[in-house]
Image: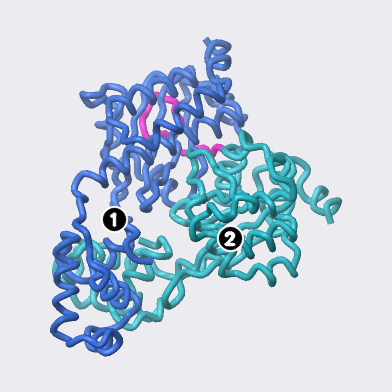
Chain colours: A blue, B cyan
Amino acid sequence: MRAQALSDASPDPLQTLAEDAEATQPLAIPDAVRRFRWIAADMGATAFGLYFLGPASERSRLVPCFDSDYPGVGAATRALSGSQAEEIARHARASTQPCWWAGAQAPGEKAAFAGLAWAHPVAPPLPQTAGIAFPVHADRGQCGLAIFIGTGIFLTDDTLCDIHARCFSLFGAMARLRHSEPERVRAMSRRELECLRLTANGHTSEEIARLLKLSVHTTNQYLTQSAQKLNAVSRTQAVAKALRLGLIE
Amino acid sequence: MTATAAQLSPDISEPHLASRGGLTAFLMRLAAEIRADSYMLVATVPNRTRSEARIVASNWIFDTIELVGRRLIAALARGPHAAAPGTSARPLRAAEAPALHGVLTGEEAKLLAVLGHAELYSLRLDVGRQRLFILFSAERTGSIDQAGLTRAQLKSCYALSQAPQLLADAAAQDPLSERERECLFWVSEGKTTDEVAVILGVSSNTVNSYITHAMQKLSASNRPMAIAMAVRSGII
């Protein structure tokens, strides 16, 4: 079984290219689940899950995106959504190194993981299992974890990098999917963008009015309009949204 | 220089970057592995109106850095060619300069080519929440092993994850405490002070003081500016 996993894991450049080309297209969740199944098969894992990390720091919870029981929810996900995953969640915020665990029942697994130069051991978040978690990040700063569980996992230093890259790519697609749903921004006028840009640089409405030779009232109107178009509740949120969408520098 | 560096780190898979010398040796070996002539590790730090590049490590010659200028280096690192982990990197070739909308003028491209950076890749590194960029460049176009870049990119992420103290200088880019960062995040999501207080389970006076401290640390004159600086530098 291991030999099989190893030969499957040898990177096929054409396949990687095709995956890249597709990854830039919007990828639906079932497609992503299928690709994760391939990744899991390549490394010999029996279960997997992709999770987002919530923005709050002290309650580092894993928010499930999907797992190997999709469209249902697996037992592992239910256990990991509790507080047991806190250590790996904390790890993912500080480090990009994959982290692995292996219970006493899986000595072979332990030896295999310990041979990896770049992976880092953690306390098992799930008892009686062995697995590996890959921290992943997306364009807008979203943070997540791709977790693989199984007692037949086989990885080398090189396949570890390749699999991590595939996890990054799929997580990026899922983060974009999440982000794109509510975001449909109406066209913004040049003046509105200018006012937002100056606000982002710390200018008050009065200063902007002076700089752009407008009345304070007009400036505020532009800012209110831009906040409405961005579906923001305040000009502060409008500035943050415009920056994240790349409307202003 | 190469000999000393090699003695410091006997193997590229050596996971301990205990010293500055270890980092240099690691990056040199990584560059050699993918047949790149030069590397440069760049951190971005917030400034008043735009984020600025800070060079953490590099084997570019001094005159090149001075001639090219930090502004252009920042643009090269963060430009549309920068590849996130898991995406295939596209080269920035000086010869194709006119087609590179807004990244590189013809003059700048010529300068880069003359100075030995005819082909340049920018890779984004995610080190925990911190974000850096690594530039690999070569004198001759086509000499960099494109297939090896992805592994080099992830190995750099791993190595830097293990050596947070080496990024301490660059970490001036994230001077905020975790609480301050959280407050800014929720404000950027449009929450009012009172709402943030409820979310974090503290009083609204405390929230205001976190935000004031964050503004002072970022030397921002008001909230929108503090948010803008934090978003630009990737803190939130």
Q: Quarter holding the N terminus of chain B?
A: bottom right
Residue A193's spot in the image, x, y percent? 27, 69
User: For residue A52, what is the image quadrant?
Assistant: top left
User: For residue A3, what is the image quadrant?
Assistant: top right
The kind of residue on which mark 2 rests is Val
Query: Bounds of the magenta span?
Result: A119-132
User: For residue B48, what is the image quadrant?
Assistant: bottom left
Residue A68's spot in the image, x, y percent? 31, 23
Q: Nearer the viewer, residue B33 or A196?
A: A196
State the residue position of label 1.
A56
Let me know if residue A146 is in the magenta part: no
Tell me if I can see residue A123 in this picture.
no
Picture residue at 22% right of the left edge, 84% below the top:
A205
Q: Secondary structure at mark 1?
A: loop
The kind of residue on which mark 1 rests is Ala
B201 lies above or below A33: below
Residue A86's spot in the image, x, y percent? 35, 45
Question: Which of the labelled discs sits on residue B42, or is there none?
Answer: 2
Q: Nearer the viewer, residue B212 or B202?
A: B212
Looking at the image, is mark 2 or mark 1 nearer the viewer? 2
Q: Chain of mark 1?
A: A
Let me know if residue A122 is in the magenta part: yes
Q: Quarter holding the C terminus of chain B?
A: bottom left
